[in-house]
Amino acid sequence: MSSAASPFVAPSADVDPRAEIGAGTRIWHLAQVREGARLGTDCNIGRGAYVGPDVVIGDNCKLQNYALVYEPARLGDGVFIGPAAVLTNDEFPRAVTVDGTLKSGDDWHAVGVEIGDGASIGARAVCIAPVRIGAWALVAAGAVVTKDVPAHALVVGVPARRIGWVGRAGRPLTPQDGEWVCPETGERYREADGGLQRVG
């Protein structure tokens, strides 16, 4: 259930008037939200965070301080982006073309990171576009994601690799009778199609 409150924008934040900001969303000091960005309801955009042009962010998302979300990223509902995490958008980054002239927007093709509902990206993690992070997945702090991450996967390292599964509460799951169980909620999951699905 979303808040009916108007968005809050700190005086030092830079929010383009062409951006759409949902009810109850809070944008804090020195954050920048570019033209065409669409932020859902009840989001929290931390100090110094950056949201690129036409980025889409769902409801109840948190971008912590200095998180950088470059276009054309797409974030589902309830996504967490940790402090100083980066979602990139250029597969072959160069400042100049082969003839030495400064690249313009016409000289490259932006690719995006897609993040499913409820997923979390840890502090200083980097997601190298184009990748998809599945719903409720957890990317550990400092990880570098270069391949798609299945739903509910726990990935760590450089490059990131799966070391386990997590439930909706974010806790690592434990195996039990051919299923995976959340120690906090008791929810049960089964492996299916390379990811995890909740039972019941």
Image (tube, grey):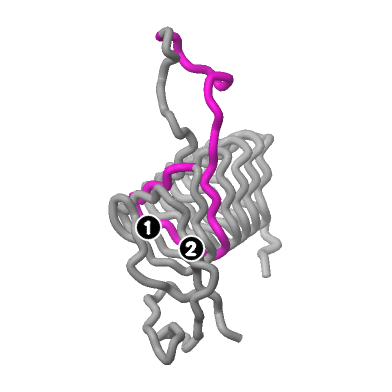
Which residue lies at the image location 58% right of the left edge and 38% below the top edge? 15
Coordinates of residue 32 in the picture (x, y in percent): 51, 38
Please rate how many residues cluster around mark 1, counting C-alpha atoms within 10 Å: few if below 14, some from 14 to 19, many from 20: many
Coordinates of residue 91 in the picture (x, y in percent): 45, 34
Q: Amino acid at mark 2?
A: Pro
Find out whether residue 50 is within the magenta segment.
Answer: no
Q: Nearer the viewer, residue 83 or 138?
A: 138
Q: Which contiguous range is marked in magenta?
A: 100-129
Of the 4 image quadrants, the one containing the N terminus is bottom right
SS majority, magenta: loop
Please rate how many residues cluster around mark 2, counting C-alpha atoms within 10 Å: few if below 14, some from 14 to 19, many from 20: many
Which residue lies at the image location 52% right of the left edge and 61% below the top edge? 134
Q: Nearer the viewer, mark 2 or mark 1?
A: 2
Residue under label 2, please give it: 150
Q: CA distance from mark 2 to mark 1?
A: 16 Å
> On residue 122, which mark appears?
1
